[in-house]
Image (cartoon, rainbow, N blue to C red):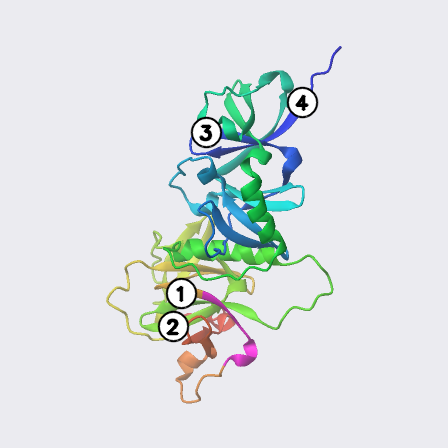
Amino acid sequence: METLNRVEILCFNMGNTKFGLDMGGIQEILEMIEITPLPDSPDFVDGVINLRGKIIPIIDLRKICNIESKEEDITELNIIVVRMEKLVAGMIVDRVEEVLKINSTLIEIPSEELPITRLLSSVAKLEKGIVFILDLNKIFDFQKKSLLTKVNREKIKIQEKKEVEPTPIVKFILHQRATNLAETKETGREKKNTEQLLSFSLGEEQYGLRVKFIKEILYFSSITKVPFAPRCIRGIINLRGEIVAIIDISKMLDLPESENYSKKMHIIVIEAYKKLAGFWVNKIGDIGDFSSSAIVPPLSTLEKNKADFIEGEIEFENDNKLVTVLKLENILNYKME
């Protein structure tokens, strides 16, 4: 009995069309992360990422294929990391679907009449529809390949992006993924004595929390009021099956309410000291590095009801503003009356 040859293809979506790549050229698949832009780069190059210590270029495959991207949550996109000879690059796609083993009898050479044929190696005709199989050699033609290989080999001077940025919540998610991905797997390597701080506003004042304790950030959510709850508990939410109490820190610190206090609020979900809680805050700020030794303790004249919840102040490196670092353990363990 003759055995049919099978081709292993990674299938993914771009727009409303299904595409595929031969698994032989794929190194790994990533969730969308924060991308650092490159100055004076072509339109199809979104920037670079730090992939466990190696700088790799990221291209938007949708732009190369002239496909209009869907208006969806940017955090749901995928980056397919491919390797071709000495070139390693990431390609942004809408969503990775599955890996298929396709009988070679179902794969045909694409018709020259198709506009996208110049980028295809073949077309697979399946029961669930057509899969356009892309050719990495055609995607990375000589000009693109030379440019991307140069990014792999050289240290690139990076400048900040001045265009419209994602919302604070999306920015936080992408930044966290990028930070985790950039960490090398080497053991015995000492890490710098620094931490990351997320700044946010309570009324007119700036506060900060250590990023390592932040589980996620939510937009204003429907909160269920709890009868006879302390004034600093705004209520509870159902977070994917878990009941989370929402704490209004401004009430604990006796801060005055701002005019827009109930509008465009955020909930910072914290998981620390064996507790899960949500903090009701105003505008989400930036993420920056800091050293615990740089925190200036609170003034001795500060009222005790505030001092118990404050670790001190620090000058935030992103914009030289003073941020009050909250003492998370005391807030979570506070016995509310």
Q: Earlier in the sequence, mark 4 or mark 1?
A: 4
Location of mark 2 (residue): 206
Q: Tell whether position 291 is magenta.
A: yes
Q: Earlier in the sequence, mark 3 or mark 4?
A: 4
Location of mark 3 (residue): 17
Location of mark 1 (residue): 285
Q: Amino acid at mark 3?
A: Thr
Q: Earlier in the sequence, mark 2 or mark 4?
A: 4
Tell whether 122 sits left or right of 115.
right
Residue 138 appears at what percent x and percent y? 56, 34
Mark drawn on residue 6: 4
Residue 212 appears at what percent x and percent y? 54, 63
Question: Which residue sits furthest top?
Answer: 1
How packed mark 3 is, by other alpha carbons closer than 10 Å (few <14, some 14-19, many 20 or more), is few
Q: Amino acid at mark 1?
A: Gly
Question: Which residue sits furthest bottom?
Answer: 301
Tell whether 145 sits left or right of 18.
right
Rounded to the nearest whole Å, what is the CA distance between mark 2 and mark 1? 9 Å
Answer whether residue 119 is visible to the viewer in this image.
yes
Q: Provide the residue span drawn in magenta.
A: 287-295
Q: Secondary structure at mark 4?
A: strand
Q: Amino acid at mark 4?
A: Arg
Q: Which callout, 4 or 1, points to the residue nearer the camera? A: 4
Above or below: residue 136 compared with residue 125:
below
**Circle 2/circle 4 CB separation < 8 Å:** no
Q: Secondary structure at mark 1?
A: strand
Tell whether 114 sits left or right of 136.
left
Q: Nearer the viewer, residue 166 or 137?
A: 137
